Each structure stands twice: as C-alpha cells, then as structure tokens.
Amino acid sequence: MTESDRAFLYQLLNTPSPSGFEAEGQRIWARHVRSFADAVEADSYGNTWATLRGTAADASQRLMLEAHADEIGFMVNYITDDGFLHVNRIGGADPAVMRGRRVHILGSKGVVNGVIGHTAIHLRDRKDEKVPEEHEMFIDIGAADAEAVAARGIRVGHPVVFAESVEEWLPGRLTGRALDNRIGGFILARVLARLAGEPRPEVDVWAVNSVQEEIGGHGAKMVAYRLRPTVAVVLDVTHATDSPGISKARHGHVRLGGGPTVTHGTANHPLVVERILQVAEQEGIPLQHEASSRYTGTDTDDIYVSRGGVPSALVSLPMRYMHSPVETVALEDVEHVIRLLTALARSIRPDDSFRVAV
Ligand SMILES: [Zn+2]
C-alpha cells in the first residue's frame, strides 16, 4: 500500500459515519474518487457513486460494485438531570464491548469526548453478573447537570462512536473501529483507480458507497433502483472463524489471510459466482467459500431483488472481532480483493449473459 493510499484509508476510517450520519465520510470518499472517475454523483440520502465509462459502444451490461459506507454506533436517547447520557444502539452495536470505553459524541458544536462509565470491580456485586444492556450503561462527559450537557451542544438524537482509531499493530494486520465496512469503500476506490488505467473495462462500472446498511440495506435499495445495473457485486466483511471459541461446525471455516470469500446460494447468482471463480483461478487469487442457505445479511439481499432481479454476488473480506473496536483485517486479503474485483470488471463483455437457462 502506498503512503497516499494509507493516508486516504486512515482518514476514511477515522471519520465517524454511523448509519444515518454518513455525510462527512462520503465527502472524503467523493473527493478522492473524483481524481480518476468520469463522474461522481450522490442522491438525497448520501449514497455516493463514481462512474467509469467502458470502452464498448454497447451499454447492454452495466456493472455495479457496491460497498456500504456506514458503521454501527450509538445514539443519545435520554439525558439525566445530573448530566449523564443514556444511549440506544445504531445497528448491531455490541453491549459486551461498551463498558469502560472512551467515546466521541457528534454534537452540534463538534465532537465531545466522553467515557462509558464502568463501576469499579470493588464496588460491583459480581454474583450472577451479566453483560448489562445498553440502556443500563451511561456516558459521562464531565457535565454537572442536564443544562451543562446542552451547553456543550448535545441533545437527544446525536450519534456516538467509540473513540478508537485505526492502527497497523503488526505488519499487514489492521485494527480499528469501522473497518466494517469503510475498508470496502477504500477497496472500491482502489479498484476504480486501477480500472481507470489500462486496460479500461469494456462495460460501464459504478463503484457505489452506500448508506444505512447496518440498519437494513436501505441505501442499497435506493441505489440499485436508481442505477439499474445489469450485474452487481457486493463487497462486505465476513467473519473469520479462526480465533478461539468459534464453532466451525456452526459458522463455517474462514481464515484471516486466506483470501476473499465468495458466497454460494440465495442472492448469489450462479453464473456471476462462476465468473468470480474463473477470474480468481486465472489471476491466481486464493478464494474461500461460504454458504448462504437463507440470506446473506448484506446489501446483496436488497440489490438482487431490485426491479426484475439483478444477477448479483457477494465477495467478502475476512475480519476478526466484527462490531467491536478491535475489528481486524489482513492487508494481503485487501490486496487480493482489489485484484479480484479489478480483473472481474475487466472480464465482463457487453454480450455476456447472466441468465439461468430454462
Ligand atoms: Zn456490520
């Protein structure tokens, strides 16, 4: 990774973008891709896409590469008279990692630092102790009362994220908050930059950075309807199951550093999946396999049913400790995903058919 790539990635990761509040991160992404895309556009909710026009005159295939830009977080739900904040969760934020953490509250006067209070071990009754629910915890911003909270620019409805930033704590191992899934937006930007060089793809390619995935795939629905892709590949993170205590019998086996995964079943169109397998083989890119027997739990579920159906597939980046402040990915997997999606886009021809023969 070049120094400028890394600077862009870190800036993207360190800019809070909880679901529904993605604007600042989207602006950073848009500014970056504008230097090599043919066009960069956004819709009213902040879904943002960069277009690279293909070399073929025939526009009968249009490829959408999609990743979600939002992250999980919390939201101020109640402010006590003595100046503590209670929150509810944005998306699947995990109460098990909340206590004793530093947070940033994105208030109307800028970022306010706080801590999620953690009563000392000496003072807790630990008999039958369970992980408290989010509403049982509280944020301390050092305010004496509710008026002092308001004076700092904080009210009900302001979003909150963990204060953790990104760190490469071992060469090739990146850890931080919000790698799910802003690393996806970073990867799509790198893919588009490579496609803007030679050889250009024959078909038009959209790199889409969509909003509100963590609360239900809403941005993906809007953008798939608007852009009318004829083929779509979604990039998200997936659970690496190679750390202790995870049942492979239940959750499958995905290794960190083992290469991107491709998912089979449900939203994943067999001919698009087959193309991904072919491209990976030609390029010598390691692939891992995942099964989806009911749904994928990603934007793919919303994109493939758009309009008359969009042949789609899900490619995922293995991640340990998802939805925690220590989300961890391997940079060799990141490079393999970039190479895979770049080669896939170049492989698509205007006369390709992704149609199940009946
Ligand atoms: Zn997530």
Image (cartoon, rainbow, N blue to C red):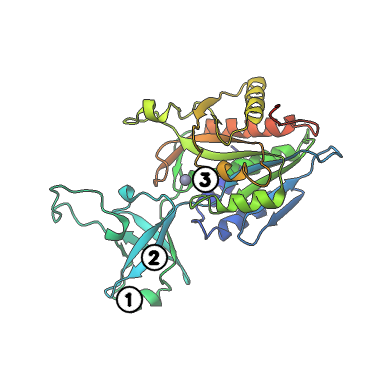
The image shows residue 335 at horizontal and vertical percentages of: 58, 32
**Mark nearer the N terminus (2 vs 3):** 2
Quarter the N terminus occupies: top right
86 left or right, relative to 358: left
Whole-angstrom CA distance, mark 2 to mark 3, is: 23 Å
Q: Is residue 335 left or right of residue 347?
A: left
Q: Residue at x 71, y 53 (%)?
A: 40
Per the rendering, the mark at residue 8 is none
- Mark 1 element type: helix
Residue flagged by tag 1: what amino acid is it?
Ala
- x, y (%) of residue 17? 51, 56
Of the numbered discs 1 and 2, the one sitting upstream in the chain is 2
Badge 2 local density, few (<14 within 10 Å), some, or many (20+)? many
User: For the residues marked 3 and 1, what is the alpha-carbon distance in whole angstroms?
Assistant: 35 Å
Q: Amino acid at mark 2?
A: Val
Q: Which residue is mark 1?
A: 146
Q: Residues within 10 Å of mark 3 (few under 14, many from 20)?
A: many
Q: Is the distance from the Cβ of mark 3 to the nearest ligand 1 atom less than 8 Å?
A: yes
Q: Which-is-in-front pick, marks 1 and 2?
A: 2
| Residue at image point 57% right, 34% down | 315
Name the residue tied to disc 2.
Answer: 76
Quote the CA–CA distance across marks 1 and 2: 13 Å
Q: Which residue is mark 3?
A: 181
Q: Is residue 94 above or below residue 333?
A: below
| Amino acid at dot 3 | Asn
Asked if one can make out residue 330 in the rendered structure from this viewpoint, the answer is: no
Above or below 102: residue 287: above
